[in-house]
Each structure stands twice: as structure tokens, then as C-alpha cells.
Image: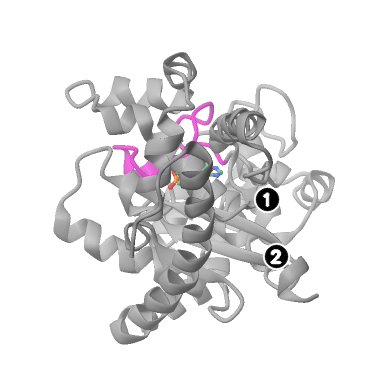
Amino acid sequence: MSDEIKKRIFSGVQPSGNLTIGNYLGAIKNWKKFEDDYDPFYCVVDMHAITVRQDPAVLRRRTYEILALYIASGLDPEKNTMFVQSHVPAHAELTWVLNCFTMFGELSRMTQFKDKSARNASNINAGLFDYPVLMASDILLYQAALVPVGQDQLQHIELTRDVAVRFNSVFGDVFTIPEGYTVKSSTKIMSLQEPTKKMSKSDENENAFVAILDEKDVVMRKFKRAVTDSDTCVRYAEGKDGINNLMNIYGAFTGKTHGEIEKEFEGRGYGDFKTAVGETVADGLAPVREKFASLMKDKAYLESVMKSGAEKASYIASKTLSKVYKKVGFVPRIR
Ligand code: TYM
């Protein structure tokens, strides 16, 4: 397929914590398959990250780390445009315009805003409230058709669609209306300690999540401690949230269905199953960890990817932004 007719993909990850296997299975791992037939853009969304307080030095380090993780997960920089959000000013600029097309009530209903404001009661800043509009700008600037994410982001994509439709209904077909893309079994990886809650990189309990970069012994220990139930049979069923989650994780790494997993562990206890999940996850992540370690030693290479990514992203983003500015009636800058 030529570049002209390839549909565009957009997604992003916040450099705001140690990435978990939730981020990996729900998002990054699924991106590789798009690189030949689509034109993918993957952003390290540092501007989103500062909606909660960040240590500047840590934010800088994590920005490199996320980019390294994208590449370590198999994304080819020749086929995927990878860049840092704050390197492309059009994200902030489009956000302002779209703010004027997004309703206070809509933003008030966002689940992530409600959750995050409950967790950061002393810092419910305007950026946290406006976060979904920045996310809409990320997606719409690139005229993305598909947005591969985990389930927790689908509400933001719905809002993006609503805002885009609203804008288009006034000004014509300016924005492509994007669709969310999720992989059913791994769209919501749950906490290992409270399996009714999403696995989150910001969880205070380190046993609740497995980080992509955790060493094998840590991975094994966390799975051993994973909360299950008083049944003893490995089967996928309502009310067995802990086991269902482990089956989803195991399935995502092995490609096995729930039925196949049930058969494999028939007559075996949870201990065996947890060991198998731990080993599979640790071994599955080992190549990512190794590649990551070598990439992090080559800052110059990461910066060259950032640089060319930002150039390509800026070119496309500025085309959309100029169109938007013209449509709303801004006088073009006199040069
Ligand atoms: P973030 O940084 O919280 O998470 C990055 C990606 O990981 C997915 N994810 C999960 N998937 C399955 N199970 C889990 N437990 C789990 N936890 C996280 C998220 O759904 C996400 O796909 N707002 C976004 C970043 C963003 C973005 C965008 C995404 C900014 N602009 C534009 C897509 C398009 C976020 O906070 O993701």
C-alpha cells in the first residue's frame, strides 16, 4: 500500500510511572501488527503527565524510557512515527480551539477525571479537567482513523468523536472521526491484589502490578502473591476475578484461549498455574527488557528517533491546525 492511502493510527502513553503489563498487553504489544498496513503515530504524552505533579528529572528520564520501550517492544522507527508530545506545539494550540467546542458537562462526566481528582484532592487543577481535550487534539491533529488503547481510554475516544462531529457539523469535514481499537482479552488487565480494580502504574501497593521492567524473581513473587479465590479449579467464570485475570494475562502471552488454558491446568492447583503464568510473563518480557537496556545506553539514537518523529509529526499536525485556524476565522500570520 502506498503512504497516501494508508489509514493513520494514533496512540500514546504517559511517562508518569513504571509501565505495567497492563500498558503492555492493553496497548503497546498490539501496535506492531499495524506497521505494514497503516501509518502509525505513537506519542510520549509528557504534557498529559504534568496534570499530576512530576519530578522534572524523573519526567525527563521516563520520556526517554517510554520511547525506548516502544522500540524495545518491536516498533520499527522506519515504519512508526514516534515522538514526544511537547515537541509539537500544535497539540497545545489545537487544544485551545477544541476547548471552545467542548462542554463543561461533558468533561465533568469523565470517569478518569473523577478518579484522579479523588486521588489528588489537593491538586484538582484545570489541566486535569481539560486532559481529554488535549487527548482529542492528539488524535484529531493526525486525522487518525484508529486509536488502539485499553478499555479505560474508550470514554475519552467517545468524547473525541463527539467534539470532532460537533466541529465538522459547523465547518465541514475537517476531522476524520476516529474509532477506538481494543483487544478483548487484554483490554483491562486487573490488579493482582484487588482483581476488581484496573492494574495501574500509580498503585501504591507494588504487589498489585507487574512492571514491564521487573526482574524475573520479582515477577514470580508478585504472581505467587496474586489474590485468587477459594475454589481450586483453573476455569474462567463469573466471580473468579483473580483467576480470570491470570488467564487473560497467560492467554495474551501464549495466544491460548480460555478453553485451552482450562485443559492445560485440569487437575492442577493454583500454585502450579501461578508459577506457569509468572514464568511465561517473565520469559515473554525478557527480550523487551534486554533491548530496552541497550537502547537506554544509546541516548543519541533515541534522540535521533525523537527528532525525526517530531519533524514528521509537526508537518502533518501543522496542516490540520492551519485548516482549523482558517475555518474558525483567524487571520493567517503575515510573513
Ligand atoms: P496511560 O499512559 O494511562 O496508559 C497507556 C495505555 O495503556 C492502557 N492501559 C491498560 N490496558 C489494559 N489494562 C490495564 N490495566 C491498563 N492500564 C493502562 C491504556 O488504556 C492506554 O492505552 N490518556 C492516555 C494517553 C493518551 C492517549 C492519547 C492515548 C494521551 N493522548 C491519544 C491514545 C490517543 C493515558 O493516560 O494512557
What kind of element bears circle 2?
A: helix
Residue 57 among magenta residues = no
Look at label 1 and name its amino acid: Leu
Q: Is residue 273 left or right of residue 47?
A: right
Front-most of 135 and 23?
Answer: 135
Residue 156 horizontal/vertical position (percent): 53, 33
Q: Is residue 92 above or below residue 312?
A: above
Look at label 2 and name its amino acid: Phe
Q: Residues within 10 Å of mark 2 (few under 14, many from 20)?
A: some
Task: Say which residue appears at 17% left-offset and 23% top-offset.
Answer: 122
Residue 188 horizontal/vertical position (percent): 59, 38
Q: Is residue 118 above or below residue 203?
A: above
Residue 282 horizontal/vertical position (percent): 51, 64
Residue 215 horizontal/vertical position (percent): 39, 66
Residue 200 among magenta residues = yes
Residue at the spot of label 2: 34
Which circle's residue, 2 or 1, is located before the other in the chain? 2
Of circles 2 and 1, the one toward us is 1
Front-most of 44 and 71?
Answer: 44
Q: Residues within 10 Å of mark 1 (few under 14, many from 20)?
A: many
Q: Magenta residues, as a range?
A: 189-207
Residue at the spot of label 1: 146
Front-most of 36 and 197?
Answer: 36
Given contact means CB atoms under 8 Å apart, are the residues at marks 2 and 1 in contact? Answer: yes
- Ligand 1 neighbours mark 1 (CB distance < 8 Å): no
Visible residue check, residue 100: yes
What kind of element bears circle 1?
A: strand
Q: Is residue 255 left or right of residue 120?
A: right
Q: Is residue 302 left or right of residue 136?
A: left
Q: Which mark is residue 111?
A: none
Task: Say which residue appears at 15% left-offset and 60% top-offset.
Answer: 57
Quarter holding the N terminus is: bottom right
